[in-house]
Image (spheres, grey):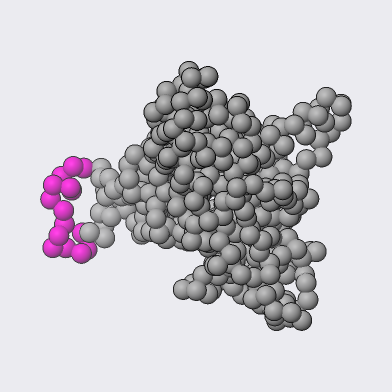
Amino acid sequence: MHRPDERDDADHCLLGVVTEGSFSRGLRVRLLDPAAVEHLRVGSFVVLEGDRHRYFGMVTDLSLDTTDSAIAADPPLRSSFASRILRGTQAYAVAEIRPSLELEHGNAEPQPARTIPPHFAHLRQATAEDFAAVFGHEDATHFALGTPPAMDIPVPIDLAELVKRSNGVFGQSGSGKSVLTRLLLIGLILADEVSVLLFDMHNEYARALADQPQLVGLLELFGPSRVHVYTLDDRTERSAAARTIHIGLDQIEPGDIELLAEELNLNPTFATVAHHLYGRFGREWIVRTQEFDSEAVKAFCSETGVAEASVNALRSKLGRLVNRPYIRSSLDFSVIDEIIQKLQKGTHVIVQFGKNDSFLDYMLVANLLTRRIHSRYTEEVLEAQLAGGETKVRPLVIVLEEAHKFLTPEAARQSIFGTIAREMRKYRVTLLIVDQRPSSIDREILSQLGTKIIGPLSDQQDIEAVLTGVADRSGLRNLLANLSPRQECVIVGHAVRMPVAIRTRPYRREDMFALVRSRPGHSDGSERAREERLRRLLTGQRG
């Protein structure tokens, strides 16, 4: 039972009382103050005070009701006095609440709700103490992406739980996905428990964009000792803090181009032909194929039984790879191996594409690098298990923009990204997929994402897709439909104890530098001196 002082404290912020409902459909709460309906909003985090438990839940809907249908048929339009008398008595507002967690009085940890409160249980606004009981406080492994839309209380996510599985950031174009992703990556880098590999297709994560100077980049925040940039285009990234990527044709295997079948318009037989060529010529298979003349094609086809037309078609399509400016015929050094070594040592890597930003470039480099990571991490974890020891492989999060290109139902079944999303967490590798069209992503992949951070989505197919595998889809559907166009999102999954709507924390240069400086072990002199050192480094100056 409540102590008297607890009941008194709860009564001063009383919003309404439970009148009906069920565990499966949610509870209906009659609001006592006629004006309360304008202060609540769908997605508000609220508390129901039962006799034995405190229930934490979310407002899933708001509605107006009357005790007499005649009032709705003949409302008191001409009498403000009658309106005031009827409102709150015969005409009233109702909030629908979905309890997610329950906390038995005297216990410290809330548990998933398995029951409901009795009739006339009190509904009240959540306090800072309620938020702390459910979401905890910011610390080394808890990072707040924002606050509730109508309150100034940080809502941390559990980064330790987040990185155990693959996750997703979703939202329509212009909804602030890149800011959400930046914030999440800042939290991961500060926690220093994983390495991050970011495929930066639009060159917007390393440093501030020219038209958005207030949005500080990760390289500017953390410096090249912690964040290293690799680029396919040294014309757009000339700083001393970046290294140019070159890829040798002798480093490309048939499996590296299987994901490019649609981009290269390859016919279904290309894989068979490519593997025959690789089996015959080894690492020189692309170079030797490009050197074929008609007689060499005929000779190869007579030996292998493949069709001449298929070989000629593959030669033509591979020509698009050969002509990419970052491609070389052969290389003695593998920058891909260098990137993997940096990741395993704890350096975070951003791969930029510069002007080589077609989907062909993006998919080739991302697929080639990720396939090597898959092989290396799987091998090292299995070796540690066979030796009977604990693996020392540092966990890795791969950030994949435009993820629907890699994770369509067809591609997900055969691509390395589908494999990682389904099973690689046991080998210490997970994905953070960032996308505006979740309906194009394989449903099995969506259902296995541990945590989803969902911004505004206008397309109903995208909303249905992003809620795949999520409980209480109807309540969350209403919530997503009522998000503000920018700076609001819903977080659902393992990194939070219950679904929650937040307003994204400000992402301004001064705020982010202050955040980094406030964490132990991350101070690096005064901000002015730090920024001056970074400015010199990023522009290639000495001194």
Q: Is residue 215 left or right of residue 219?
A: left
Quarter residue 26 falls in: top left
x and y percentages locating residue 212 in the rendered image = 49, 72
* Point 80% across, 64% down: residue: 521
Q: Is residue 58 left or right of residue 254?
A: left
* Point 66% across, 61% down: residue: 243
Q: Is residue 364 above or below residue 271?
A: below
The C terminus lies in which quarter of the figure?
Answer: bottom right
Q: Nearer the viewer, residue 519 or 327?
A: 327
Q: Is residue 335 above or below residue 419?
A: below
Q: Is residue 424 visible?
A: yes
Q: Please state the total of marks drawn on the protein image.
A: 0
Q: Is residue 150 above or below residue 112?
A: below
* Point 61% across, 26% down: residue: 279
Q: Is residue 273 left or right of residue 370?
A: left
x and y percentages locating residue 283 in the rendered image = 64, 36
Quarter residue 442 falls in: top left
Q: Nearer the viewer, residue 124 or 373?
A: 373
Q: Nearer the viewer, residue 236 or 46?
A: 236
Magenta residue check for 72: yes
x and y percentages locating residue 475 in the rendered image = 41, 40
Residue that protrudes farthest toward the front in the picture: 295
Q: Is residue 48 visible?
A: no
Q: Nearer the viewer, residue 34 or 253?
A: 253
Magenta residue check for 128: no
The N terminus lies in which quarter of the figure?
Answer: top right
x and y percentages locating residue 137 in the rendered image = 68, 55
* Point 39% across, 52% down: residue: 172
Q: Is residue 277 above or below residue 136?
A: above
Magenta-colored span: 68-82
